Image (tube, helix red, strand yellow):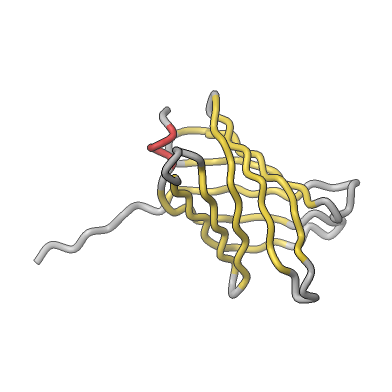
Amino acid sequence: MTIQYLVGNYAVEGSNQDENGISYHGVLTLSLDENNRILARWTIGDHIQKGTGFFRDDILVINFNYEGDDGKIYKGVAVYRFINQDILDGFWSEKHGDPLYLGSEYCTRIPDTHFLN
């Protein structure tokens, strides 16, 4: 699979990096910059996270960050394995998260829809 094929929107189901593993849903948008680096944007409710990453051997690694409700910047890394061309299975960890746990995410591609007139 080529890096260009990664571009698109994915429905995300995930769990947080803590004992309770509270679940969440959202959208992951992957795009490319002018140097073919991965740009990622997670939208979970009204919460936005952004990151940059790289892709090799069907593995996608993204370094991400976001501003918390307390105004602090939080950073972490997400790692995804492509199960097939439309499904990613991954895990993530934040620097200040509970080190005993990993967060998880399962992503499925949202097909582009075009309306004919």
Examine the image and state in which quarter residue 34 appears.
Answer: top left
**Horizontal and vertical percent position of residue 89:** 60, 40
**Horizontal and vertical percent position of residue 62:** 62, 43
Query: Relative to 58, does residue 115 appear above or below in the rendering?
Result: below
**Horizontal and vertical percent position of residue 116:** 12, 62
| Nearer the observer, 29 or 14 | 29
Q: Residue furthest front?
A: 34
Query: Which quadrant, please, contains the N terminus?
Result: top left
User: Residue at point 65% right, 63% down?
Assistant: 24
**Horizontal and vertical percent position of residue 19:** 87, 56
Q: Residue furthest left?
A: 117
| Nearer the observer, 108 or 45 | 45
Query: Relative to 91, does residue 111 appear above or below in the rendering?
Result: below
| Nearer the observer, 65 or 91 | 65
Query: Which quadrant, please, contains the C terminus?
Result: bottom left
Q: How many marks?
A: 0
User: Residue at point 80% right, 54% down?
Assistant: 17
User: Residue at point 45% right, 39% down?
Assistant: 35
| Nearer the observer, 92 or 40 | 40
- Asked if residue 76 lies left or right of residue 89, the reply is right
User: Residue at point 89% right, 47% down?
Assistant: 99
